[in-house]
Image: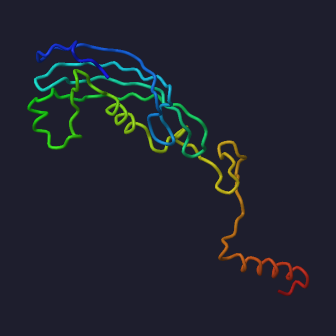
């Protein structure tokens, strides 16, 4: 929550604020996010406009997670640019908003950036993060990390629909070696 009483209610007046805080809860997706207790840095400008306070600036943090292919841990710098209007109570913007949730509002001379920041960071983070763009992932058969596997790592697996035929061919090949006529 930011107290906006320090922003004069004259259009064009502004103040700049910079601070860092720890997140009480994790912000982000399942595979990557800013951990609870992670630091989030704010560098914002609060500008008085006719209808409210326009908040612009950057929010930065370090996200932690795991690669979506090989499951190795990773970190990623996150920086989002915010532009959000917080409407004064009973302003024309406040009165004409069709949806209660479509507009951020100033309540008791304070603005709440929490949901704005959560939404901005969530859209910036990848759903399936990668440790490197060319990460080969894990072997689907044995689970070994393919980046660390020996050259030509692979498994001879027969499709179960062809397994019976393969067994017959193996038997036939073995029989051919005995009398050589087949």
- Left or right: 130, with 113 as reference point: right
Q: Nearer the viewer, residue 172 or 100?
A: 100
Residue sticking out furthest to the front: 108
Residue at image position (65%, 43%) is 147
Question: Exactly how many numbered labels are in the figure?
Answer: 0
- Left or right: 31, with 5 as reference point: right
Is 40 drawn above or below residue 29 in the view shown?
A: above
Q: Quadrant of the C terminus?
A: bottom right
- Left or right: 136, with 94 as reference point: right
Residue at image position (33%, 33%) is 115
Q: Quadrant of residue 111?
A: top left
Residue 49 rendering spot, x and y as whole percentages: 13, 22
Is 16 drawn above or below residue 34 in the view shown?
A: above
Is 59 drawn above or below residue 100 in the view shown?
A: above
- Left or right: 75, with 80 as reference point: right
Q: Nearer the viewer, residue 166 or 34?
A: 34
Q: Quadrant of residue 131?
A: top right
Residue sticking out furthest to the bottom: 181
Is 121 drawn above or below residue 70 in the view shown?
A: above
Q: Nearer the viewer, residue 100 or 154?
A: 100
Q: Quadrant of the N terminus?
A: top left
Residue 130 rendering spot, x and y as whole percentages: 52, 40
Residue 9 rendering spot, x and y as whole percentages: 13, 16
Residue at image position (36%, 20%) is 42
Residue at image position (49%, 25%) is 38
Colour mode?
rainbow
Residue sticking out furthest to the left: 92
Residue 105 rendering spot, x and y as whole percentages: 21, 30
Q: Nearer the viewer, residue 70 or 19?
A: 19
């Amino acid at each position: 929550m930011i107290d906006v009483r320090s922003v004069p209610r004259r259009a064009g007046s502004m103040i700049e604020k910079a601070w860092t805080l720890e997140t009480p809860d994790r912000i982000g997706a399942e595979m990557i996010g800013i951990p609870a207790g992670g630091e989030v840095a704010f560098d914002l400008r609060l500008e008085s406009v006719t209808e409210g306070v326009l908040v612009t600036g950057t929010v930065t943090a370090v996200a932690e997670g795991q690669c979506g292919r090989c499951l190795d841990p990773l970190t990623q710098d996150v920086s989002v640019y915010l532009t959000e209007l917080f409407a004064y109570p009973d302003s024309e913007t406040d009165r004409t908003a069709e949806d209660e949730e479509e507009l951020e509002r100033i309540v008791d001379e304070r603005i709440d950036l929490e949901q704005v920041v959560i939404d901005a960071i969530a859209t910036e983070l990848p759903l399936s993060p990668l440790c490197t763009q060319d990460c080969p992932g894990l072997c689907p058969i044995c689970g070994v990390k393919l980046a660390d596997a020996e050259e030509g790592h692979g498994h001879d697996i027969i499709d179960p629909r062809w397994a019976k035929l393969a067994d017959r061919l193996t038997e036939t090949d073995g029989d051919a070696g005995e009398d050589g006529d087949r």
